[in-house]
Image (cartoon, helix red, strand yellow):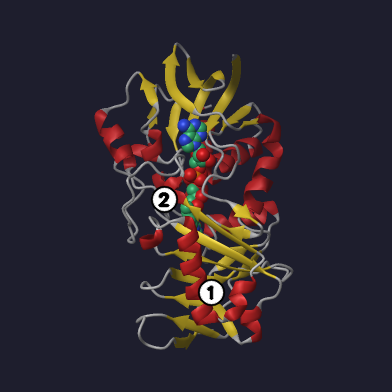
Amino acid sequence: MKQITATYIIVGAGLSGLTTAYALHQQGETDIIILEARDRIGGRILTKDGIDFGATWFQNHHEHVTTILDHLHIKKFHQYSEGKSVLVYNSMAPAHYFENDPSYPAAYRIAGGSLAMIQALATIHQERIYTNTKVSHIEEIENQIVLTTNQGEFKAAKVIVTVPPRIASQITFTPKLSNSLMKSMENTHTWMSNAMKVGLTFKKPFWKAKQMSGTLIGQIGCVTELYDHCCAKEETFALMGFVNEALRDVSPEERKSRILEHLQKYLGNEVLEYLTYEEKDWSQDVFTNTDAVKSIYMSPRYGNPAFQETYLNNKLLFSGAETSPIHGGYMDGAIYSGFNAAKKFIAQD
Ligand SMILES: Cc1cc2nc3c(=O)[nH]c(=O)nc-3n(C[C@H](O)[C@H](O)[C@H](O)COP(=O)(O)OP(=O)(O)OC[C@H]3O[C@@H](n4cnc5c(N)ncnc54)[C@H](O)[C@@H]3O)c2cc1C
């Protein structure tokens, strides 16, 4: 079994962990290792066939997202919303249409998909990211922290755990962390861990030809929200949205057939000419969700002050979207907490 040592070990190669690695590197710190349980980097950021199955949008007030995109020279673009949008509010009534108010600022998307940001952040650390490496035990031994994983032991002077708090509560800490901290971790809902997305690609954006935006909204439908998801360069054409959680328990075949029927009804027969159809149910992903799924539609409170403290004699910090007092749960919170964790450790030196 391996035994690898570094000054900094970051647990989790999601947006927060990779931001911390990037920020430490900017300060001249290069002895950094990132341990990631999944076989891929990005965590709740996942772009496949140009479709963002995880985080997608940000707004003007998400200043940390803008900052990091500027650093990485990645462009943003507005969510397409021109033309007629569909409101499904009553399954018996015909579709209602509405137009988006052009004076209301549309959300931004990330050119190349949200994963572009992850890949750019990871470039400098490519060799030092260990995927398929799940941390199960974090122990303070003398002046070091020893991390036990399925791939052997790792040792560090400083550790940043960026795993969503509820998932991090499954890690064993020695000496034990206080009961109140463990309770705070267990009680912190992982934002969007209940979400299920669907994405379809097409040869052409047929909805635009019909002066439709591709937006479809309605809690009673099989797809509760759907949006145009063409790429920034208008070279790939797609629709992406959220699946009604009531369909979670039906068979994949039935779910797909009901979703297609719903979209065909409101957007037209061209829906059936899709090139690819894919779903992602985050509730089934053990590195995001632990719960028997319960929907949470309102933003829970994030940024518990306990997550801002240092532990194990100043050698352990928590970070990640749910620990952030600013825009907790969102990409902006993940980036804010990522920069903040690096700052705290640098300030110790
Ligand atoms: C469907 C969906 C839609 C979303 N939409 C938006 C949106 O439009 N806008 C927005 O701002 N935000 C959105 N979000 C939220 C956004 O994805 C998160 O805020 C952000 O990606 C969190 O980053 P993070 O690094 O804090 O956590 P994560 O991305 O969860 O990263 C944590 C990492 O830790 C790893 N890990 C877990 N356990 C272990 C272990 N024991 N050992 C080692 N590694 C481990 C995980 O695999 C993961 O890679 C969405 C999320 C989802 C799921």
At a point 25% along the width and 33% down the height, the residue shown is 180
List the residue tagged with mark 2.
Answer: 193
* Mark 1 residue CB less than 8 A from any atom of ligand 1: no
Q: Amino acid at mark 2?
A: Ser
Position in image of residue 68 (x %, y %): 61, 52
Q: Mark number for residue 139?
A: none
Residue 343 appears left or right of 173: right
Q: Amino acid at mark 1?
A: Ala
In front here: 22 or 262? 262
* Furthest residue in direction top, as rendered: 142
Q: Which image quadrant: the N terminus?
A: top right
Cα–Cα span, label 1 and label 2: 25 Å
List the residue tagged with mark 1.
Answer: 106
Position in image of residue 52 (x %, y %): 58, 58
Q: Secondary structure at mark 2?
A: loop
Q: Residues within 10 Å of mark 2 (few under 14, many from 20)?
A: many
Number of the front mark, 1 or 2: 2
In front here: 132 or 103? 132
* Mark 2 residue CB less than 8 A from any atom of ligand 1: yes
Circle nearer the N terminus (1, 2): 1
Q: Secondary structure at mark 1?
A: loop
Total marks drawn? 2
Please tell me whether residue 167 is drawn above or below residue 9 in the rendered image. Answer: below
